[in-house]
Amino acid sequence: MSLISPEASLTSLDERARDIFRRIVESYLETGEPVGSRTLSRGGVQLSPASIRNTMQDLTAAGLLGAPHASAGRLPTHAGLRIFVDGLLELGDVGEDEKREIEARLAVKGRSFGEALDEASSVLSGLAGGAGIVVTPVRDAGVKHVEFVSLGPDQALAVMVFEDGTVENRLMPLPSGLTPSALQEATNFLNARLRGRTLGEAKSEIRTELDQARSALNATAAGLVEDGLAAWSGGDGDDRSLLVRGRANLLQDAAALADIERVRSLFDDLEQKQQLIGLLDNVREAQGVRIFIGAETRLFSLSGSALIAAPYMTGRQSRVVGAIGVIGPARLNYARVIPLVDYTARVLGRLAGAEP
């Protein structure tokens, strides 16, 4: 079956085909079940079941609908869902109660921005019904001080103080046999090269220096420096935090074995942190909400999942720093989730701009 492009498909639908297609997609998003011609004829389509079937066959041939079984009704394909979302979806509004809940839970007095990000993923999970995900912002403030504090023979606390007043602490394992002098050597090495510079500016240069100076540095101290860089958020995608809340919500629709297997596959998706952060980093380059459905991305090609995400930016500089979204099955309630994600991203932006 050859798929025609979304642009051509939407414009090629006549009024009858557009109405039937819209009804099938809306029914599927509500129930998750295939839709048959008799269901449509009873639901207000002023055509005979035979005429409806003919139109459904045309939509199937165009790649917009599919049939799970030969005798079953029709479901929208991922391409069909994309066309519906881009051209036929009527967005809802965020209710005043929901706005108040989002504002109240994110803007708690005394809460750090990092805590607000974590709460944002939770509130989106609860309101939207999927798993709420947030990529923490890229750290662009200069480093003021770095220190490793030994907590025992096999663990240390890595402390990094930034020039904007932010302090980040990370627990990290210590290499076996590390001496106090090697720990201090790693601290001195990072302080001498990071102070006054951002992590992004310093990281590649430090790694180059490590390669060149490995013979002069204690080998365990060099390894500790690398582990310390990986312990802090900010910087490249594989070094940054990915917050996921509400995975249990993804099981609510798992009424059949096939759904359970789909959700297991989705859980595997969520474990692929680097790919998901990379996907959300693409959102940072866009204006407004972006939607990824099923096979449109390699990450969701097996599970048939969907991601609705929006960038959030600092209010003072209007600069995008991170992304927030909801991940779930392809039949997410797009009309409800899209405005929820957009509003939550805007609230996060105001909070980010208010940080000292």
Image: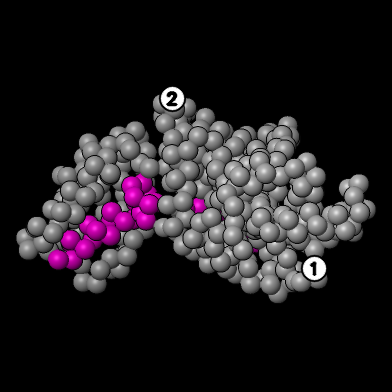
The quadrant the C terminus occupies is top left
Give the labeled residue for mark 2.
Answer: 316
Are there few (<14), some (14-19), or many (20+) residues within 10 Å of tag 2? Answer: few
- Which residue extends farthest bottom? 257
Across and down, in percent, residue 100 comes to 68, 33
Across and down, in percent, residue 235 comes to 33, 47
Give the labeled residue for mark 1.
Answer: 72
Vertical placement of 211 versus 352: above or below? below
Q: Is residue 255 left or right of residue 328?
A: right
Name the residue: 18% across, 66% down.
220
Amino acid type for the residue under numbered disc 1:
Ala
Name the residue: 33% across, 38% down.
140
Looking at the rendered structure, which numbered label has been put on residue 90?
none
Q: Is residue 172 left or right of residue 341?
A: left
Q: Is residue 207 left or right of residue 90?
A: left
6 or 181, nearer to the observer: 6
Query: Quarter of the image holding residue 167?
Result: top left
Q: Which region is colored magenta?
A: 219-248
Amino acid type for the residue under numbered disc 2:
Arg
